[in-house]
Image (cartoon, rainbow, N blue to C red):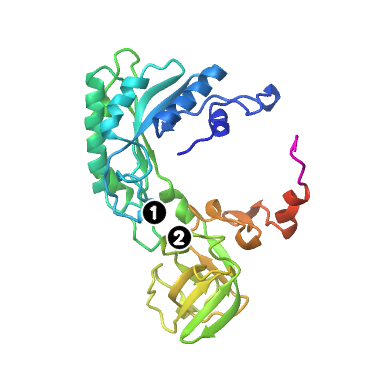
Amino acid sequence: MGKSESEIIAALGRPEDDEPAAGFREPIALFNVESEGEFQLISTIAENLRIKARAALRVNPDVDPVTHSYTTTGKAETKFGVDIARARDFFKSYDGHPWLKLCGVHVHLGSPVSSPQPYVEAIGKVLSLIDALEAVGHRIEVINIGGGFGADYTSGQALPAQAYADAIVPLLADRLERKWTATGRRTQVVLEPGRTIAANAGVLLTRVQYVKTSGSKKFLICDAGMHTLVRPALYQAFHFIWPTSVAPQHVPAERTAKPGVPGLEACDVVGPICETGDFLARGRDLPPVAPGDLLCVFGAGAYGMSMASRYNSHPLPAEVLIDGTRAKIVRARETYADLVAHELNAQDIAGS
């Protein structure tokens, strides 16, 4: 969405500065095109660089994925894709372009999607569109059904992959068996697992700085907050939080808002940012916690560091890769010197 010229050039495998020493790559497998203007820009750049590439048109099926309004992308009123009614004219206008081959259809409904039914509805609409396109001679080699499949932010929250497969695979099985006479290539089906894989591959560790009581509320003030994990503040998302070291009676059987162990107290887990919206959890039942204790925020692998910011002049945290008993820093913790380095190295703009 909103691809810049520099991003398109990089995706085409050409360094932006066009220096051969920087190295060349093959183009990405497929551009997902969101609009007529985007297709025109990509195709113009591809032609200027003399690089042939492939594209799929992202269609908007107007299907409700029944998720947060901010992460709903398949409804007609959202900014994503081209409506199905316009898709036929799109293929009529741009199919056969010599530098950007329009050979696929892409659909993405949003995330997280906790039921197969929206996929069934959307894929049905997409297949009807493809049938209509093929009937007038367009060749669809790729169907990208997107992603958005749920993840276990609480134990057992997400459906198993098999549940989605049972509903989706029968719809696409016929396409997978087809072969184009000219190329012998089966229709390729692409999907994007996303958070299903990444969410629980990462956790956020935060240290409790202060424990504070105000009125009837107990606050755990931590060194992480909306700047390191924005999902609770932005999407009202649930992330299971628990101290890294607890007494045996406080070991939870599963990750849930109400773990059902004795001796818990409702706490707001908040960060250091000067905003009331800076929280990781509100009214969360937790065992006794003291300043200096570490809390583990689960399910942070998908949209933790990737959405982290330096808001309020907070340096980005370190990233640590754990493999069995081995741990390796893969991104060093930033310092305040890192924050101001670009300002200290500021240069005059030529001609100013």
Q: Position of residue 23 (x, y in %)?
A: 65, 25
Q: Nearer the viewer, residue 309 or 220?
A: 309
Q: Is residue 258 above or below residue 309?
A: below
Q: Position of residue 227 (x, y in %)?
A: 56, 61
Instruction: Give SS at disc 1.
Output: helix
Report whether 283 appears left or right of 6.
left
Q: Which mark is residue 270?
A: none
Residue that label 2 marks? 234
**Kind of residue at disc 1:** Tyr
Main secondary structure of the magenta stretch: loop
Give the image quarter of residue 58.
top left
Q: Position of residue 124 (x, y in %)?
A: 22, 37
Residue that label 1 marks? 70
Residue pictured at 57% horizontal, 30% vertical: 10
Give the image quarter of residue 134.
top left
Query: Quadrant where the N terminus lies?
Result: top left
Range shown magenta: 346-352
Q: Do tag 2 and tag 1 residues touch (Cβ < 8 Å)?
A: yes
Q: Earlier in the sequence, mark 2 or mark 1?
A: 1
Cα gap from disc 2 to disc 1, whole angstroms: 9 Å
Q: Position of residue 261 (x, y in %)?
A: 40, 79
Q: Residue furthest front?
A: 352
Magenta span has 12? no
Residue pictured at 62% horizontal, 57% vertical: 310
Residue pictured at 41% horizontal, 64% vertical: 236
Instruction: Give SS at disc 2.
Output: helix
Res 143 visible: no
Q: Residue furthest top?
A: 182
Q: Nearer the viewer, residue 131 or 286?
A: 131
Report whether 175 appears left or right of 212.
left
